[in-house]
Amino acid sequence: MSEEDLREAADALRGSVVVAGCGEVGREAAAQVAVEGVVARADDVVPDDARAAFVGVDLADPSPAVALARRCAAADTLAVLVAAVDPRPTAEARTALATLREAADAVVLSAGEEPVAGTAAGLRTLVRLIAGSDDVNVDLADAETVVATGGFAAVGAATDPDPAAAMTAAVDACGPVSLTRASGALVHLEGERELSVQAAGDAVAAVRDRLVDGSHVIWGADTDADEHREGRAHDGEVTARVVLAGVVPVRPPAEAGDPCPRCGAALVGYRMGDRETVACDGCGFADVTTPLGGDPLVPGEDYGSGSGS
């Protein structure tokens, strides 16, 4: 395809993508997303002719996002819900994640303690990765293949002069997730024309090395990005964006006083010899690595302890 054909295809792709928001957090986050050519709405209205809706959600009130996901399914529109997840989420947030996972094509988690900023960052990274490049190397078909599996995905972005270092940092920015079951990744690099195929390949290898054998990795690169584009790389630096699909979000070890992930009561600290641990006197929860969005304790499962797993 010629450069003009690529730009026309990219414009058509961006025109078919809508950013929307559900709940107070989701609406505020969607209003902060500005990617040229992509319609961003500070509400939960998605036109019937949209091919995909990237929706910021409010974990305090998941019902509007569930309803929107069902409307999108009826209209054959890809629905990807984006939620900011605190490293130590409440029991209510865990329940909301489970509810959203059942309703949407995908639930993409964005690490961040501040809900609006975290959700906006996740939306922005996801939309720019899929619809922000004139090269159209990563598109909606790729998103459906890799991400739209009905499970959890995680999104991250980072900038560094070294492409592989940028990609490693982007994976780390995905937050506390286990990659032991990861099914694939969407990867995008943005830099200047000096970004070589070899350097891009090294960066993609940095992702493959973190995933299990057989994971599906689709990648693209956008060189010499226009100056007016939000989030472009500067001064020889490379911006790496990644979506990891099929992840298991995990909760880091708890501390005394944290809310119990099972019942919400305050955890109590105990000392067992030289080891300190926490437990819940109310429901009996003992501190272990905990998967989110489901049963807080799944016997026999090894979820690892974070994005390096």
Image (spheres, rainbow, N blue to C red):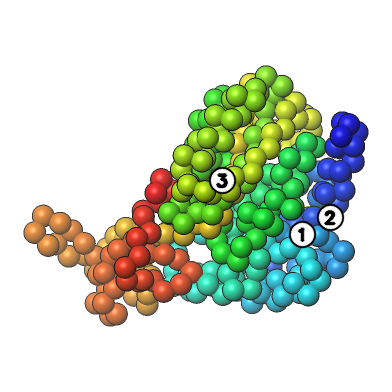
Return the x and y of residue 68 as percentages of the image width and height. 72, 72
Pick the front one: 295 or 272 = 295
- Quadrant of the rendered structure where residue 44 is? bottom right
Left or right: residue 80 compared with residue 98: right
Residue labelled with disc 1: 52
Left or right: residue 151 compared with residue 15: left
CA separation, marks 1 and 3? Answer: 20 Å
Local packing at callout 2 (Cα closer than 10 Å; few below 14, some 14-19, many 20+) is some
Under tag 2, what secondary structure?
loop
Q: Is residue 274 visible?
A: yes
Pick the front one: 9 or 238 = 9
Residue at 39% in and 49% down: 309
Q: Looking at the image, is 54 positioned above or below residue 224?
A: below
Identity of the amino acid at label 2?
Answer: Ser
Quadrant holding the N terminus:
top right
Counting residues from the start of the chain, the first of labels 1 and 3 encountered is: 1
Local packing at callout 3 (Cα closer than 10 Å; few below 14, some 14-19, many 20+) is many
Q: Residue 156: which disc?
A: 3
Q: Residue 135: which disc?
A: none
Q: Looking at the image, is 20 positioned above or below residue 209?
A: below
Return the x and y of residue 264 as percentages of the image width and height. 38, 74
Return the x and y of residue 178 as percentages of the image width and height. 43, 54
Identity of the amino acid at label 3?
Answer: Gly
Under tag 1, what secondary structure?
strand
Under tag 3, what secondary structure?
strand
Residue at 50% in and 30% down: 165
Identity of the amino acid at label 1?
Answer: Ala
Residue labelled with disc 2: 16
Dot 2 and dot 1 residues touching (CB under 8 Å) = yes
Q: Farthest residue in the top direction? A: 194
